[in-house]
Image (spheres, rainbow, N blue to C red):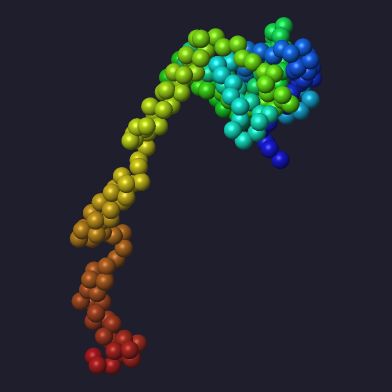
Amino acid sequence: MTTFFSVPTLVGLAELAGAIRDGMTVPFTHLAIGDGGGNPVDPTGRTGLVREVDRVQVASIKKHPAEPTWLVVEAAIPEDRGGYWIRELALIGGRAGGKVMSVSNYPAVERPAPGAGAVTGMVLRMVVAFVDAAAVSVLVDPQAYATLQAVLDQIGIHEGKADPHPQYTTPGEAATVAATAVGMHQAEADPHPQYARVGRLLTADVLKALRGARAFRFFNSAS
């Protein structure tokens, strides 16, 4: 069973049916973001979010490449928004506006507050299924689309770098460090000073005692 999924609300289905009947389209305008009240969410039968923490404008809607009745809704959280967890999404729209069209759960992810020092733009994607995808439209605010494109550009630049995470050791660097450490270890005159060496154990007194022992004569009869 799919862990994360969206479910159209009865209001959303009614809106879509009315648009098809009237030869019109249903606009999608926003993605509402919720934290689930601190708990995972099952969207089945829900009419809205458990607890909404933010709302961002829809920037694009694309048909799913594998499923003709699925739509991929994209929106971007600007850099100056955050300070919450994301566990659920709701698609907002309707001909009158402000209606919850579909509800989805979401993998729990923390959106740090702007002052945390590690905040960048974040793209949200919600896949929704409707019988007639052609009856759906999107009201795109140019600023929302620009924000989405800016975030996608940042991701592209990041992934295009030869070493996008210089704070982490690469496999090649790890191998070099390991080889250097082994070489230095093997070059030491006494790499294991915590262990007694045979040369230190077999002092003159110890050898004399061993030669006088029956066990030593038995195993070393030539002495």
**Number of marks present in the image shown:** 0
Q: Is residue 53 visible?
A: no
Residue found 29% across the figure and 48% down from its top:
177
Locate residue 57, reporting x and y percent.
Answer: 58, 13
Residue at left offset 71%, top offset 21%:
102
Q: Is residue 181 above or below residue 147?
A: below
Q: Is residue 72 visible?
A: yes
The picture quadrant where one finds residue 205 is bottom left
Farthest top residue in view = 96
What residue is rendered at 37% in x and 32% in y?
A: 160
Please state, as top left, top right, bottom left or bottom right, where the C terminus lies in the image: bottom left
Residue at (78% x, 18% y) in the render: 17
Whole-percent x and y of residue 123? 52, 23
| Residue 106, image quadrant | top right
Asked whether, in this view, residue 177 is left or right of residue 20, the answer is left
From the top left corner, tell me how far across and down residue 134 is, in percent.
Answer: 67, 21
